[in-house]
Amino acid sequence: MSRIAGWVLLILLLISCQKSSNSIENLLIKGSDTEVNVALALAEAFMEKEPNVSIAVTGGGSGTGVAALLSGKTNIANSSRPMKPDELKMAEARGIRPLPIVFGIDALAIIVNEQNPLDSLTMDELARVFKGEVRHWAAIGGPNMNVSLYGRQSNSGTFIYFRDEVLNAEYSASLKQMNGTAQIVEAISTDPAGVGYVGVGYLLEKSGDLPQGVKLLKVSRAKGQTAYSPLESSHITSDQYPIVRPLYQYVNGKPSGRLLEFLLFAIGAEGQAIVSKNGYYPISKAQHAADIELLNAEVAINK
């Protein structure tokens, strides 16, 4: 190789390296409205550490995120529920290997209007209320008015989780399906007969107070047992509060590069501090170990 050719090759290599170091790497995160704020906070913190990475975060519901993963239109599907059997079947048919990484723990808070004199409900009462079997608050010690139900729309992971884990049946036909958590809170704050469920991370305002006009109910597993609040972390970690669920970030198969770095950041110490700051609960050491094992696995396993 001539001296001139050598210099040309060196210059091309330098240009290539500079281009690589300055290039923006894009990641897309889509799905659960419950997770969108905490995912955005994680993305912003990660981008601050890694300026060459651009992460776009959008909500739309868990079903929307999973659909985007199955069609190859997102890197991460945020989901507040496990993927459904039909979604897993579709993934298999399309050669998609959904890998579920749990990065936080959410508790569903039961809220009523501040005028409601009730302080707690049992799981059975809660189920009967949302199934429509209890239509009048007075039947369970509440005010003398008909129950007004508020929940999420059917593509929401929260809608499905609450139906499958609390009701074990279909919702009452009178359920008002709201587009987002904020709408549920706003509606109940002005409806003395209202009751609804929201992710606890969404409930408190920046001041740490409940939204105006809204009251949080404690929940017990059965009549005669102690009712617990989802706002006390000890009630979550000790498994005393009964409506607790994992928050998932699904990816297609074993991740690498920036995608892997972001997932590790989310379940690491810095990411978990962000999860806590946003009102959710950090994963256990056992869950962290399970996530790491899964990230290192070649075969995706749905939990």
Image (tube, rainbow, N blue to C red):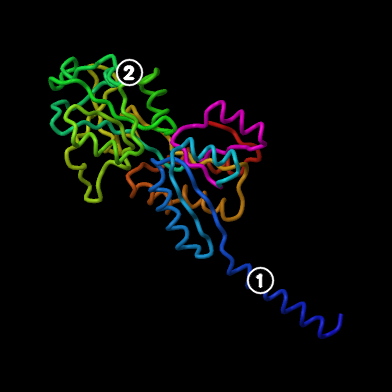
**Residue at which label 1 appears:** 17
Q: Position of residue 201 (x, y in %)?
A: 32, 42
- Mark 1 closeness class: few <14, some 14–19, many ≥20 residues within 10 Å: few
Most foreground residue, 287 or 164: 164
Q: Earlier in the sequence, mark 1 or mark 2?
A: 1
Is there a contact, CB below 8 Å, between mark 1 and mark 2?
no
**Magenta span contains residue 107:** no
Q: Is residue 273 above or below residue 104?
A: below
Q: Position of residue 18 (x, y in %)?
A: 63, 73
**Residue at which label 2 appears:** 131
Q: CA distance from mark 1 to mark 2?
A: 61 Å
| Magenta span | 75-102
Q: Position of residue 38 (x, y in %)?
A: 39, 48
Q: Quadrant of the N terminus?
A: bottom right
Most foreground residue, 3 or 281: 3
x 30%, y 36%: residue: 234
